[in-house]
Amino acid sequence: MAQDKKKPGWLKPLAFGALLAVLGHLLTIGLIPSVIMNIAIKRIAEASGGINRLAHGNMVTPQNQQIVRSSPDLAYSTCALDLSKGPVRVFIGKGADYTSAAFYAGNTDNVFTLNDRKIGPEGAQIMVVSARSPIAAKPGEVVVSLPSDKGLLLVRRLAPSAEAFKRVQGERAKDFCRTVTDGM
Amino acid sequence: MPMWRWLICGVLGLGLGVGSALAVSGGLFSDAKLVSGRWSTDPTVGAAAANPWLRATIARVGLLALTKEETVYFNRDVDDDGAKLVEGCTYALSGEAIQTRWWSITIYGADQMLPVNTDAASSIDATRALVAPATTWTGTLSPTRPTTPGPWLSSKGGGTYSLTIRLYNPQSVEKSALQALKLPSVKKVSCTQTPASGGAH
């Protein structure tokens, strides 16, 4: 009889604990990408002097690395995207070696990547729009639709030596990332 | 009914849920689906359809990864005999041409960052390792600059570390093709200290 009284005393609290364990697990798993991405977007925006601005990184070294798993063989350029006030135009110049422009949504998904094999000698004109409010692009423009207003653009250019990095600095000098209302 | 039972179960449950989420996303129970020698990769990395657990893991240990069509990332934290890679040991690296547009091997510490040192040897890439007309290469992975020729990967400050090889624009991303790749070997040559006393940063 004593045991019969004890069981109901623990059963509901244990079930409550199990429910919180499942909810806590799912909530944490669901929040991790957006929390980390928001931190990355904030840091990149600060480094670039604001949102929708392209910033060219230096050669990655152990002393200046800013993000996990950076590659010292690549020259990175970044742009923190915010489409809440309209679309963003991006220009990526043709490189002599491997070049890619990868667009990430606010949940870390890589929604689109354009590499140099698909970039003509005149470079790539890209219009980044929100899935909520797409607008017509100019002829010849590649349209990238992000499922969220916030995201990131990460441009990678192969630069495994100081000489290659110097060449890349010239190649990316005309690259940009700007809101359309900036007059583009 | 005493409230302390609800409190204990609630706190323990929440702690278990959050703790398990952090452990899983930190790669603690990582079970990469594709293995090539001692190298392993998860081919869904970078894919938009990645499940929430993999997406959380990528956010913590491989943020801003590319899709497999663009880059395949193979990782390893053990030598060819299965022992953990540690700063106190010297390893011989050897490899051959890989059917990919370009590749590079980079060393990362337990915190997923480049080991902090001033050796300027955090990576080896195809352009430096395979100078034409060579089709094979040998190099060294060690905490001090080797006297032997060939590319050097510095493990100084790495503690217990891992290696990542990036394969850009691989010729094929089919499972069988990736498994058949002959990725570089990492053979232990000597150790100056026990693995447990490997440096940290």
Image (cartoon, rainbow, N blue to C red):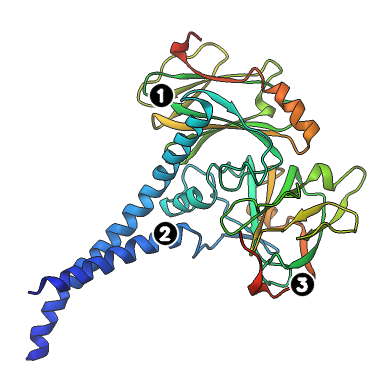
| Badge 3: chain ID | B
Using the numbered discs, state the Cα–Cα distance from disc 1 to disc 2 in whole angstroms. 31 Å
Foreground residue among B169 and B74: B74
- The residue identified by callout 3 is B191
User: Judging from the image, what secondary structure is the residue with disc 3 in?
Assistant: strand
Foreground residue among A138 and B62: B62
> Residue B73 in the image: x percent, y percent?
63, 50
- The residue identified by callout 2 is B22
Q: Amino acid at mark 1?
A: Leu
In the picture provided, is B103 more to the left or to the right than B112? right
Q: Quadrant of the N terminus of chain A?
A: bottom left
Image vertical order of residue B25 relative to residue B131, above or below:
below
Label 1 Cα neighbours within 10 Å, binned few <14 / some 14-19 / many ≥20: many
In the picture provided, is B14 more to the left or to the right than A131? left
User: Judging from the image, what secondary structure is the residue with disc 1 in?
Assistant: loop
> Residue A64 in the image: x percent, y percent?
62, 41
Label 2 Cα neighbours within 10 Å, binned few <14 / some 14-19 / many ≥20: some
> Residue A152 in the image: x percent, y percent?
49, 33
- The residue identified by callout 1 is A83
In the picture provided, is A23 more to the left or to the right than B96? left
Return the mark for residue A64: none
> Residue B153 in the image: x percent, y percent?
76, 54
Q: Residue at x 44, y 35 (%)?
A: A42
Looking at marks 3 and 2 on the same chain, the residue that comes earlier in the sequence is marked by 2
Label 3 Cα neighbours within 10 Å, binned few <14 / some 14-19 / many ≥20: some
Which of the 4 image quadrants contains residue B184?
bottom right
Mark 3 and mark 1 on one chain? no
| Badge 1: chain ID | A
Count up the numbered dots: 3
Q: Nearer the viewer, mark 3 or mark 1?
A: 3
Image vertical order of residue A14 relative to residue B173, above or below:
below
